[in-house]
């Protein structure tokens, strides 16, 4: 297939954000007031004093995937809203905790929640978002008090009945599984920091769990809620999983070579944190003199700026940057192939392909 140009992806993100964000804001507003205020700051909807801000929030890739997956099987966009809200809540719960684990002081060019409100409140806020994700899915599906309001899920009663049976149950079970995989990937990532013998395959397996599982869920939850055939759901999930690997490969490149003015983080940040991301794992596995020197640098308790610069150069010398860029492109192509393996709505399929291209080509 000929992928949709990446320039079309921001339009898709804007369109799906307009559908999902009101429901996401409504869900967050139901939290205990202190937790809601912290979450609203994290999402970029308000400042630290609770003053509302325009144009907040992240890119919304996961919620866009959820909406497109419903549209790809011929279902109304609104069918995906509970799944889109749930996956955004889980993703952002993980970001709140990740910033603490990594010691990152900024998120989206603003103070990280833990740096502003304290670690304890950031942890509890993350826990609250995690729980809220399941309240949204189950509340909407079974008519509980946390059901999305009519304005956020305005579909006909017959469509609602179809989505609130087996689809909601499966979407909830699958979200639990994807979240568990993400957490497993996170603990593996953390354990790698103290090792110099992390293999390339171990790094790939970790990223498949940490990033691929939740993107696979996002890319299929709309179809699950629409009760699409299992083979179609599986094809969309594989697309999301491959996209997750491409996404993480691109993220690993940005973690070392990203422009600080765009990413909001210093160049070489992943090396300061001694992450065994794909470029590092590849370089260490080459068995060259440069690999050995890189291992010696990463064995240091901390790296100063000259050491970060040296490590960056060593990775490039053994081909780590080039290999990961090629890997990102290969996973991107694999995601396109997954879309071709099942019958989907042509427009939605083109938008899914374009969104994948955008994700891999992004600079932040």
Image: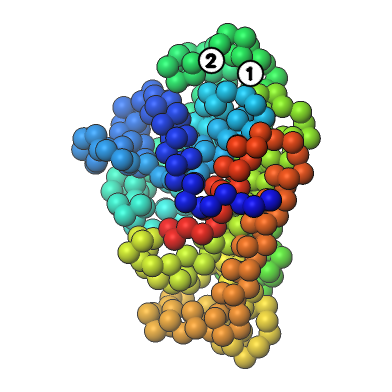
Image: 282 above or below 102: below
Say which quadrant the C terminus sits in: bottom left
Q: How many residues crowd around disc 2 within 10 Å: few (fewer than 14), some, or many (20 or more)?
A: some
Q: Position of residue 115 (x, y in %)?
A: 31, 52
**Of residues 193 and 139, which is closer to you in this image?**
139
The reply to whether residue 250 is visible in this rendering is yes
**Of residues 29 and 251, which is closer to you in this image?**
251
Residue placed at 60% from the left, 37% from the top?
347
Residue placed at 25% from the left, 38% from the top?
53
Residue placed at 43% from the left, 76% from the top?
302
How far is the residue under mark 1 from the one under mark 2? 10 Å
The reply to whether residue 270 is visible in this rendering is no
Q: Are marks 1 and 2 in contact (CB under 8 Å)?
A: yes
Tag 2 residue:
155
**Of residues 168 and 99, which is closer to you in this image?**
168
Q: Position of residue 352 (x, y in %)?
A: 59, 43
Tag 1 residue:
163
Sequence order check: which comes first, mark 1 or mark 2? Answer: 2
């Amino acid at each position: 297939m000929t992928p949709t140009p990446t320039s079309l992806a921001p339009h898709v993100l804007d369109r799906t954000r307009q559908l999902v964000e009101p429901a996401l804001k409504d869900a967050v507003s139901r939290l205990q007031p202190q937790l809601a205020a912290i979450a609203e700051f994290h999402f970029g909807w308000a400042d630290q004093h609770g003053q509302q801000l325009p144009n907040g929030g992240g890119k919304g890739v996961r919620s866009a995937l959820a909406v497109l997956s419903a549209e790809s099987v011929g279902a109304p966009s609104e069918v995906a809203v509970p799944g889109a809200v749930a996956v955004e809540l889980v993703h952002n719960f993980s970001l709140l905790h990740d910033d603490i684990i990594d010691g990152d002081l900024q998120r989206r060019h603003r103070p990280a929640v833990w740096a502003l409100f304290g670690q304890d409140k950031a942890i509890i806020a993350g826990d609250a978002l995690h729980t809220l994700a399941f309240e949204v899915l189950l509340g909407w599906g079974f008519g509980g008090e946390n059901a999305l309001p009519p304005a956020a899920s305005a579909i006909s009663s017959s469509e609602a009945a179809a989505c609130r049976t087996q689809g909601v149950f499966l979407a909830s079970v699958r979200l639990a599984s994807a979240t568990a995989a993400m957490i497993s990937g996170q603990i593996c990532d953390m354990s790698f920091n103290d090792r110099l013998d992390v293999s390339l395959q171990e790094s790939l397996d970790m990223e498949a769990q940490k990033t691929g599982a939740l993107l696979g869920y996002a890319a299929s939850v709309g179809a699950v809620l629409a009760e699409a055939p299992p083979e179609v759901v599986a094809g969309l999930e594989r697309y999301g999983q491959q996209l997750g690997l491409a996404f993480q490969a691109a993220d690993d490149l940005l973690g070392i070579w990203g422009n600080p003015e765009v990413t909001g983080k210093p160049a070489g940040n992943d090396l300061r944190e001694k992450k065994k991301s794909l470029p590092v794992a590849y370089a260490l596995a080459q068995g060259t003199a440069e690999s050995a020197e890189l291992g010696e640098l990463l064995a240091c308790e901390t790296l100063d700026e000259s050491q970060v610069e040296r490590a960056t150069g060593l990775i490039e010398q053994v081909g780590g940057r080039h290999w990961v860029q090629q890997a990102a492109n290969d996973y991107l192509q694999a995601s396109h192939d997954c879309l071709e393996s099942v019958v989907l709505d042509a427009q939605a399929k083109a938008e899914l392909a374009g969104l994948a291209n955008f994700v891999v080509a992004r600079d932040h």
